[in-house]
Image (cartoon, rainbow, N blue to C red):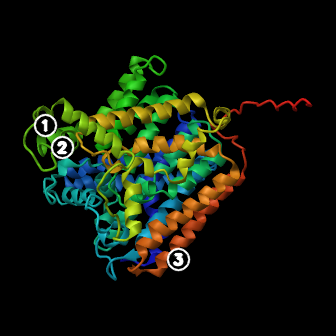
Amino acid sequence: MRSSVYLLPLLLVQALWLLAPGLLAGLLLARRDRVPAYLVVPVAGLVGCLCGYVTLWAFFAAHRLGDAAVAVFAAAALLSAPWIVLRRDLRAALRRLDVAAPLVLLLALTLTYAAVTFSCTIAPVAGQVNGFCHLSGFTGDNILPQLFADNVHHGDPRTVTWDWQGSDRPPLQSGVQLLQAPLTESPAWRVMSYEVLTVLLQVLWLPAMWGLLRALRVTTRAVALVIAVCAGTGLCFFNSVFTWPKLLPAALVLLACGVWFFDRRGWWSWTIGGLAAGAAMVAHGGVVFTLLPVGAALLLPRHRPSWASLGAAAAAALLMVAPWVAYQRLYDPPGDRLLKMHLAGIAEPDGRPLGELLRVRYGADGVTGALANKAANAATLFGVQDVQYQLLGHRRTSVVRDEEFRYLALSFGALTLGWLALLRRDARRRLRAAADPGRLRLVLGLAGASLAGWVLLMYGPSTTHLHQGSYATMLLLFAGAGVLFSTLPRWLTGFAVAAQAAYWALVWVAAVWKGHHLHWGYVTVSLVAVAAFAGTLLWLYRRGEDAAVEGAPERPVTAPRPAPAPA
């Protein structure tokens, strides 16, 4: 295990490698008014993922070709950074609040999460990724992308890991690992670099959330509040450090929604959105539960573009998805175990086609059994289940962590107060002042339709635990709840943010660390990183209601209330 002094330099190197080419592309697109400033960082993440995806197929074709791809993209990163620094217009674009703030927050939160993870190990030294306290005793899903990347790198991608084929899990995170193969495939840096890189990928939810909230025309003060609460929830924290790639595709779906619904700027928007949606599908197929209602909404008269635009989006998405589907069907079939598990309730490998399994399973259940399964799925969203699980330990806090991780109704943390804000008599007026009501209704409508489809499509019973669905839906719900949360009195939101931070520190950090081996260098780094993250958010919050940046709302002028007439 490497010393803590390497963590920040390693993060900066890996972030530069991943984001610099896309950051240059995003800034150039923003300069030409092709994308809004608040989507520059999400676009940078998308471009980094595309580079990783190309690298994956290059290694699959030939090891030398993969090495060449790594060298080309590393050179692109090294050239992109000075290009941005040396050009005055790009430096000015980079300093814009909607670019600089989410980028700084992305790095600060990644450093925080990674340092917290590295601070505690089960044994005195962690020899593998799952030797850290926050990653042990759960499943091996977080290292399946790492193992698949290793197999591709070694020229044997069809190697079976446990009882999983390589084709059973989407490959995007594996591709990004191979993009940085000199680090991630090096025995000396393998553990640390893989965790840092994949945490960075998952924390792309933060700039994606920033972009979505700005598209809803929310002020920076409100954005800071929402991100502060989100960062302290179990959903965002645990799924960022336990890096089964679920938050990465969620971030990509939010980027697609941003360019498709809220900021259309010609064929660029449809191409970027199509690439983002396709990349999300090859990162984790669970996002299909969100993409289905997104696609349906694009066919409604209010949102429907030209057929040429739809064709551009579909072609871009197909460009991403088709190679992986061909790999699954032709090279390492069948590659459909997750589909059978979720849609037909078959957990073990089964050679029968999905259609046959659906006929057999639903035929055996009958209408009554199927309806009972769907009712149990709906009830599970609210934590109505007789079984009690534990996450990261065996104390009472382990049950609390698991319930927050598992059940939708318990996952919002302090943002739950946002839903309660709807009970206020003046909620509608406050909402009109806080965000664009039409756009907010669309976000909540997409999330609601996604949840309904998820409940109905999952075989059941009680198979709608959050990690079995789409985290893109959860980010949409978090954004909606966050907008509502921002309308509450300032004293209440301030108290709620402080309570959420304390809850995270006690339940998700201190309680997990208790009784294990602490590494004080990393503990120190985590404290410094928390201070940097919190300080940045506090600075954004104290800027007040100033939202004079791209994507800001034009505030409706509210006339003062007349003084009451004397009795």
Q: From where the camera sits, is residue 344 visible?
A: yes
Circle 2: residue type? Gly
Q: Residue 132, how many percent across, how many down? A: 35, 72
Q: Residue 188, how many percent across, how many down? A: 31, 74
Quadrant placement of the C terminus: top right
Q: Nearer the viewer, mark 3 or mark 1?
A: 1
| Up-down relation of residue 478 to residue 509 (above or below) | above
Residue identified by numbered label 2: 345
Q: Earlier in the sequence, mark 2 or mark 3?
A: 2
Which disc number belongs to residue 290?
A: none
Q: Residue 547, how many percent across, how many down? A: 69, 42
Q: Residues within 10 Å of mark 3 (few under 14, many from 20)?
A: some
Q: Which SS class for mark 2?
A: loop
| Up-down relation of residue 501 to residue 489 (above or below) | below
Q: Residue furthest left?
A: 351
Residue name at image x 40 percent, y 20 percent: 299
Disc 3 from disc 1: Cα separation: 54 Å
Q: Nearer the viewer, mark 2 or mark 3?
A: 2
Circle 1: residue type? Arg
Q: Which SS class for mark 3?
A: helix
Between residue 335 and residue 121, name the one nearer to us: 121
Q: Earlier in the sequence, mark 3 or mark 1?
A: 1
Residue identified by numbered label 3: 524
Between residue 247 and residue 414, name the one nearer to us: 414
Query: Do the residues bearing badges 2 and 1 touch, measured as CB atoms within 8 Å?
Result: yes
Q: Residues within 10 Å of mark 1 (few under 14, many from 20)?
A: some
Between residue 102 and residue 426, name the one nearer to us: 426
Residue name at image x 76 percent, y 31 percent: 558
Quadrant placement of the N terminus: bottom left
Residue identified by numbered label 1: 361
Disc 2 from disc 3: Cα separation: 46 Å
Circle 3: residue type? Thr
